[in-house]
Each structure stands twice: as C-alpha cells, then as structure tokens.
Amino acid sequence: QSALTQPASVSGSPGQSITISCTGTSSDVGSYNYVSWYQQHPGKAPKLMIYEVSYRPSGVSNRFSGSKSGNTASLTISGLQAEDEADYFCTSYTSISTWVFGGGTKLTVL
Amino acid sequence: EVQLVESGGGLVQPGRSLRLSCAASGFTFDDYAMHWVRQAPGKGLEWVSGISWNSGSLGYADSVKGRFTISRDNARNSLYLQMNSLRAEDMALYYCAKSTRGVTGAFDIWGQGTMVTVSS
C-alpha cells in the first residue's frame, strides 16, 4: 500500500487560510469516508483534528475543516494562528483493511 | 483521565525480538479497537497494526506482516506488540493509539510512545 500524497510544506500569514491536500487512490480515499487528519507539534504525540472526512472532535477549533472529492481529501485551516504551526498528517482506511498515512505536511506560519 | 502508556522499548540487535506493552486507563478498554503506529526519527507516521475489541479482527502493514503480532488482554486493559526478526528499518518511536470505535475508527487518543532502537 503506497503512502498518500501530501505537499511537503505549506505556509501562510496569520489570519489567512491554507489548504493541505491528501491524494490517494480508489482503494483508499476514493472508496471510504474514513479519512482523518492529525496535527503533530515537535516532540509531541499526534492529535486528532478531523475524522471521517469532515467531523471535528470535541475541543478542536472550528477553524479546522475537512472535505473530500474523489481520491483527494483536504484540510483547511482558516484564520491562521502561530500555534497552528506544526506537521499535519492525513490517513485513510483501505480496501485491504489496513490504514495508510500521508507523508506529512509542514505548516509554517509566517 | 483517558491515558495510554507504552513501555518495552529499548536497544535490540538485528534479528532479535522485543515485546511492547500499552497500558490503558480512563475508558472502557474493551469497547474499542486499538492500534500501533510508528514514527522513524525525522520521518512521518506509519500504521503498523490494529486489533478489534474482541481480537477477532487483526491487521498488519505489509512491512511487518509475518514478523509482528498484535494482541490485547481486556482483563488487564493492555495492548501488546510482539516484534520478531527486528530490522534496522523497524527503528522508530512506537505509539499506541485508541480508535474512536471499531477498526475503521480514527485514532483519537495517543500515548507518548516508546522508542525501539535496532542496532548491533
């Protein structure tokens, strides 16, 4: 199972919006709404930000939103804040009952 | 407080074995699937293995299939990962993660990880 494809890095200024893409195949992202997104700050464990494409866990800011079209899922962060600077990973359930992660995207808040 | 605490990591020679443990607390352990996810130094996340609430469904990444075995003891609120025939590429921080429900659920609670170093 090949990793999902994410941009290596994205950046934005405080207050702006950014979108991180996550491209898979018809065997994972395209077939299931079991796509989730994780935020990871340096030296910390990952934190669930979005699950099942577009749902936010309790306590996650509504500045974070998710969507999916075909084989590509997206995470949008609006009103960028300094604390959003982190690595972001997407993951999807697959047709062979495994999970596959994206390579990760480093978000820099300028 | 919902918590996962991993243990069992350490330095091991290539070809040897290691058993990781994950102690869960603060939630009804046997209601949820559980997973192991690893992260090599400076690299991204890699799903390793998952297990359903009753151990009836097990899954493994191709990279560890046939070498690693996941198991759980619901009476002890514990998750395990038996790692055999370890390779240099298995060196990583191993996280235990709780699913939001079954094996298709997202990973909503993570431990702090236990480091596995494979070196002669």
Image (cartoon, coloured by chain):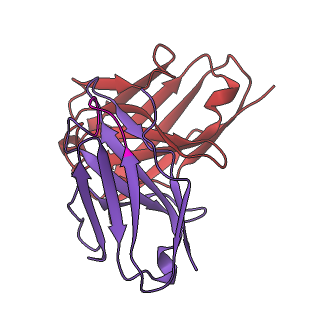
Q: Does the magenta stretch include residue A49?
A: no
- The relative height of residue B116 versus residue A16 in the rendered view (above or below) is above
In this picture, which residue range is highlighted in magenta?
Answer: A23-29
Q: Determine which quarter of the picture holds residue B83.
A: top right
Q: In front: B83, or B23?
A: B83
Q: Tell me which residue sits at (27%, 27%) in the image.
A: A97
Q: Which shade of the palette goes to chain B?
A: red
Q: Observer-nearest residue: A62 or B22?
A: A62
Position of residue A69 in the picture relative to residue B21 (left or right)? left
Task: Please tell me whether residue B3 is drawn above or below residue B21 in the rendered image.
Answer: below
The answer, for residue B106, to whether it is visible in the render is no
Q: Give the colour in which the image draws chain A.
A: purple
Q: Quadrant of the N terminus of chain B?
A: bottom left
Residue at the right extreme of this rendering: B120
Q: Main secondary structure of the magenta part?
A: loop
Residue sitting at the far bottom: A15
Q: Is residue B18 left or right of residue A39?
A: right
User: Left or right of B56: which side holds B114?
Assistant: right
Residue at the outermost front position:
A70
Percent x, y of residue A36? 31, 51
Residue pictured at 21% horizontal, 23% vertical: B56
Percent position (x, y) of residue A34? 23, 44
The residue that appears at 20% across and 61% down in the rendered structure is A55
Above-or-below relation of B14 to B47: above
Residue nearest the viewer, comparing A24 with B84? A24
